[in-house]
C-alpha cells in the first residue's frame, strides 16, 4: 500500500506536467480506486486499486483477468454505472463524473452481461429502446412521445447489422441466449455510440456467432471508427481480435499492450496461477493460448 | 443455446478454419425495410386500443348504474346523465327517488370504483416494472397493509373526525405505504439484484406484521367503530360524498399524471437496472420518484376503500398478454381495464346477495388469488 501511494503521487505529478488530455483518447482513466460500500460480507478491499490507462479512439481494447479481478466493475465504472471513490476518468476530454447519465448514454453504448428478461417486449421494441437517450429533452418527455422516423431507421439498421430482422416480432423472453445477446448488442448500436462497452459478449454464443460478433466488432471499428472495450474470459478471442489488451489482477493493471506483449506464458502463470502453452496463430501470427492438456497437467 | 434455425449466410460460413469472415452478417434479403412499424407500438394501435377500452368502460359503467337493489331503466340513466350534464333540463319526468338513488348513491359509487380500480392497476404496472417482478402488486407486497396501518393510526388519533379528513387520511395512508415500500425494498434487495421470491417473502412478512398491528388497533377501539373498520379493511366501495370524491380525485389525478409521465422510463427500467443505467437513466433518483408516486396513489386509495387485493397484479398481467409490454400502452390500458373490472366486481358485490352486500375485496381476492397461484405454479420457469 505504501508503494501504491508513492506511485500515485508520482503519476499525479506526471499527469499534471502532461497537462491537457490527448484528443485522440476516448477514455483517459487516471488512478481510479473503487470499492463497494462497506458490508459485513466484504472486507472492504478495493475492487479497483489505482487503475490507469488510456483507450485510444477507434481501437479495440480487451480487458482480461481472473475471476474477481475487477473486470466487470471496471466496465461499469467506464459506463458511469459505478462511481470510483478516487481518481478521474475523462471521456473524449470531458470529465465523466460531471456528465449526466443521459449524456454518457448518447456516447457510450453498453452491452451488459445477459440477464433473464421477464417482460415480453418484442425484439424491435427492445432495440428501439436504444434510442431512449436521444429523446427530446424536457421535463415531461420521459413518458409521452414516440420514436421519430429517424429513430426507427437507426433501429432497423442496427437490427440488420446484428441479423435479427427475422425475429423482430418475437418476444425477447422466447429467444435463445445467442439471439438475446445479439438483441442487446443491436440495442447498444441503436444508441449510435462512439464507444461500445461489452461484458462477456460471447459467453452464451456458439462458435459461429462468436466468430460473427468478433468480426463484426472489428468491422464497426474499421468502418465507423467505433471504439470498443470488451471484457472477456477468452484469452484467445481477445488475442485475435483486440488491438490492445489490458490484463487485470486484484484490481490492478498487470500489463497493458499489444497481444504479443501481454499474452506471455510467464505473465499468465503469475496472474492465473497455472501454466499454459502460448504459440503463434498460424495465419495471423498473433499469440495463441492453449491449455496444458494431459502432458502438463501436473503443473510446473 | 440453440443456433437460429435460419441457414447461416454464405459469407459467415467459414470455408476453412482460418478464413476470418470480413463481412459477417452484412447481407441482403433477411431484413426488408419497414419491418419495425409492425413490431413496435404505433400511434394508431395506441388510439384504437385505448378507444375500445374506454368504450368498454362506459358500457360497463352504464350497466353498473342499471343493476342494483332497484334496477334503473337504461333510458332513464341516459336521460338523467344527459340532464345532469345539461344542468337539469328536461328531467322532471323521472321520479325523484330514482334520481336520488342514481345521483347520490350509485353514480358516486361507480365513479369511485372506477377511480380505485384505475389507480390500483396503474400502481401494479409501475411496481412490476420497478421491481422487475410480474407478481408485484401493492396488496401482495404489503404496501396496502402499510397504507391501511397508516390510515388506522390516523383514525385512532382522531384525524378522521376533523374537517380535514378528506385530505388527512390519504396522507396518513401515504406515509404508511411509503414506509412499507421502503422496508420491503430494503429487505429484498441483494446487491443490485431483486430476487423475485425474496421480494414476495418480504411482502408476506410485512403483511403479517402490519395486519397484527391493525388488529391490535381495532381491538382497543370501541366496538362500534371497530366494526366499521373491519368492513373497511376487507375492501369496500361505499358511496362517497362528492366532496370526498373530489378530494380523492385530486390525489389520484396528480399521482396518475406523474406516473403517466414516466411511461417510457418504466419501459427501460423493466429491462433491468444495468440496462436502464446504460440507457441513461439515473436509476436511484428515478426509483425514488416512482416509489413515492406508488405510495401516494396506494395510500389515497386504501384510505378510502380499504385493502382491495390482486387487481394490481391480475389486470396488468392480463393486459400485457394482449397489448404487449410497452408501458406507453400498457399503463393507460391497465388503468382502464382495472377501473372497468372493479366497477363490474363492485356491481356483483352489491347485487349478488342483494339487499346484503359483500365487501368487494372478497370478490377481487377470489378471482385474483387463483390467478396468482396459477402464475406461481405454471409459469415458474418464466419467473425464476
Image (cartoon, helix red, strand yellow):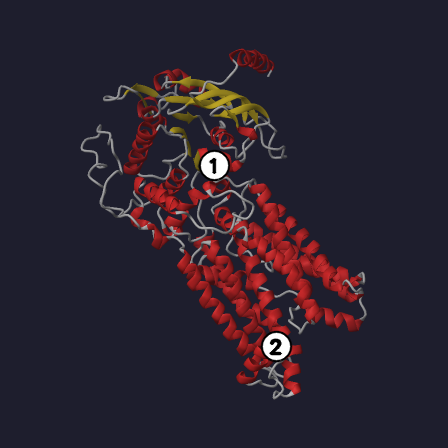
Above or below residue A22? Residue A107 is below
Can residue B369 be seen by looking at this rendering?
Answer: no
Give the residue displayed 70% in from the left and 72% down from the top. Answer: B241
Q: Nearer the viewer, mark 2 or mark 1?
A: 2
- Residue extending farthest to the left is B15
Mark 1, residue position: A105
Give the residue displayed 56% in from the left and 45% down from the top. Answer: A139
User: Is B211 on the left or on the right of B189, as rendered?
Assistant: right
> Where residue B111 sits: x, y (%)?
60, 71
Q: Nearer the viewer, residue B340 or B356?
A: B340
Q: Quadrant for residue A198, please give it.
A: top left
Q: Quadrant for residue B167, please give it.
A: bottom right
Mark 2, residue position: B84
> Where residue A246 sits: x, y (%)?
43, 22
Please identify the quadrant where the N terminus of chain A is shown. Answer: top right
Q: Nearer the viewer, residue B293 or A178?
A: B293
Q: Residues within 10 Å of mark 1 (few under 14, many from 20)?
A: many
> Where residue B196 sits: x, y (%)?
53, 51
Q: Chain of mark 1?
A: A
| Helix, strand or loop under label 2 | helix
Give the residue displayed 62% in from the left and 56% down from the top. Answer: B254
Amino acid at each position: 500500500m505504501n508503494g501504491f501511494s508513492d506511485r500515485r503521487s508520482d503519476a499525479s505529478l506526471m499527469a499534471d506536467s502532461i497537462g491537457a488530455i490527448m484528443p485522440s483518447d476516448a477514455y483517459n482513466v487516471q488512478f481510479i480506486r473503487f470499492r463497494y460500500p462497506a458490508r459485513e460480507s466484504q472486507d472492504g478491499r478495493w475492487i479497483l486499486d489505482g487503475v490507469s490507462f488510456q483507450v485510444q479512439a477507434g481501437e479495440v481494447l480487451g480487458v482480461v483477468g481472473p475471476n474477481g479481478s475487477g473486470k466487470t466493475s471496471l466496465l461499469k465504472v467506464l459506463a458511469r454505472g459505478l462511481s470510483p471513490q478516487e481518481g478521474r476518468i475523462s471521456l473524449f476530454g470531458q470529465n465523466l463524473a460531471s456528465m449526466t447519465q443521459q449524456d454518457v448514454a448518447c456516447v457510450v453504448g453498453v452491452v451488459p452481461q445477459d440477464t433473464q428478461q421477464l417482460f415480453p417486449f418484442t425484439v424491435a421494441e427492445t432495440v428501439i429502446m436504444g434510442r431512449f437517450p436521444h429523446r427530446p429533452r424536457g421535463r415531461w418527455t420521459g413518458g409521452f412521445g414516440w420514436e421519430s422516423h429517424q429513430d426507427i431507421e437507426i433501429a432497423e439498421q442496427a437490427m440488420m447489422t446484428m441479423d435479427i430482422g427475422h425475429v423482430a416480432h418475437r418476444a425477447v423472453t422466447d429467444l435463445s441466449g445467442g439471439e438475446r445477446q445479439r438483441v442487446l448488442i443491436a440495442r447498444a448500436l441503436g444508441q449510435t455510440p462512439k464507444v461500445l462497452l461489452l461484458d462477456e459478449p460471447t459467453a452464451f454464443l456458439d462458435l459461429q456467432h462468436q466468430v460473427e460478433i468478433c468480426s463484426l466488432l472489428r468491422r464497426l471499428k474499421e468502418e465507423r471508427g467505433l471504439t470498443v472495450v470488451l471484457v472477456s474470459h477468452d484469452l484467445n478471442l481477445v488475442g485475435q481480435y483486440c488491438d490492445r489488451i489490458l490484463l487485470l489482477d486484484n484490481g490492478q493493471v498487470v500489463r497493458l499492450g499489444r497481444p504479443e506483449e501481454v499474452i506471455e506464458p510467464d505473465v499468465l502463470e503469475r496472474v492465473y496461477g497455472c501454466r499454459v502453452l502460448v504459440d503463434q496463430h498460424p495465419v495471423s501470427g498473433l499469440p495463441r493460448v492453449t491449455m496444458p492438456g494431459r502432458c502438463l497437467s501436473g503443473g510446473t | 443455446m440453440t443456433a437460429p434455425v435460419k441457414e447461416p449466410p454464405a459469407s459467415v460460413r467459414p470455408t476453412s478454419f482460418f478464413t476470418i469472415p470480413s463481412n459477417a452478417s452484412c447481407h441482403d434479403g433477411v431484413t426488408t425495410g419497414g419491418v419495425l412499424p409492425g413490431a413496435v407500438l404505433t400511434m394508431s394501435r395506441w388510439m384504437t386500443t385505448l378507444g375500445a377500452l374506454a368504450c368498454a368502460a362506459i358500457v360497463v359503467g352504464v350497466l353498473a348504474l342499471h343493476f342494483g337493489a332497484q334496477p334503473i331503466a337504461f333510458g332513464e340513466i341516459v336521460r338523467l346523465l344527459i340532464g345532469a350534464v345539461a344542468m337539469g333540463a328536461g328531467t322532471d319526468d323521472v321520479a325523484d327517488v330514482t334520481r336520488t338513488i342514481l345521483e347520490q348513491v350509485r353514480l358516486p359509487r361507480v365513479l369511485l370504483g372506477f377511480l380505485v380500480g384505475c389507480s390500483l392497476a396503474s400502481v401494479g404496472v409501475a411496481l412490476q416494472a420497478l421491481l422487475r417482478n410480474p407478481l408485484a402488486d401493492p396488496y401482495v407486497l404489503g404496501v396496502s397493509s402499510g397504507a391501511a396501518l397508516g390510515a388506522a393510526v390516523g383514525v385512532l388519533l382522531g384525524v378522521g373526525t376533523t374537517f380535514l379528513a378528506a385530505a388527512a387520511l390519504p396522507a396518513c395512508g401515504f406515509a404508511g405505504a411509503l414506509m412499507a415500500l421502503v422496508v420491503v425494498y430494503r429487505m429484498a434487495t441483494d446487491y443490485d439484484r431483486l430476487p423475485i421470491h425474496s421480494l414476495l417473502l418480504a411482502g408476506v412478512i410485512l403483511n403479517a406484521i402490519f395486519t397484527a398491528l391493525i388488529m391490535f388497533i381495532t381491538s382497543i377501539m370501541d366496538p362500534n367503530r371497530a366494526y366499521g373498520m373491519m368492513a373497511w379493511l376487507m375492501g369496500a366501495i361505499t358511496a362517497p360524498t362528492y366532496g370526498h370524491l373530489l378530494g380523492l380525485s385530486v390525489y389520484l389525478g396528480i399521482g396518475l399524471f406523474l406516473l403517466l409521465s414516466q411511461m417510457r422510463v418504466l419501459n427501460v427500467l423493466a429491462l433491468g437496472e444495468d440496462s436502464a443505467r446504460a440507457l441513461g437513466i439515473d436509476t436511484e433518483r428515478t426509483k425514488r420518484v416512482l416509489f413515492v408516486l406508488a405510495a401516494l396513489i396506494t395510500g389515497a386509495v386504501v384510505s378510502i376503500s380499504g385493502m382491495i387485493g390482486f387487481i394490481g397484479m391480475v389486470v396488468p398481467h392480463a393486459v400485457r398478454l394482449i397489448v404487449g409490454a410497452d408501458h406507453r400502452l400498457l399503463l393507460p390500458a391497465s388503468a382502464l381495464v382495472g377501473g372497468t373490472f372493479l366497477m363490474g366486481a363492485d356491481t356483483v358485490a352489491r347485487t349478488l346477495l342483494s339487499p346484503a352486500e359483500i365487501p368487494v375485496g372478497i370478490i377481487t381476492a377470489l378471482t385474483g388469488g387463483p390467478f396468482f397461484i396459477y402464475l406461481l405454479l405454471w409459469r415458474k420457469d418464466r419467473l425464476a
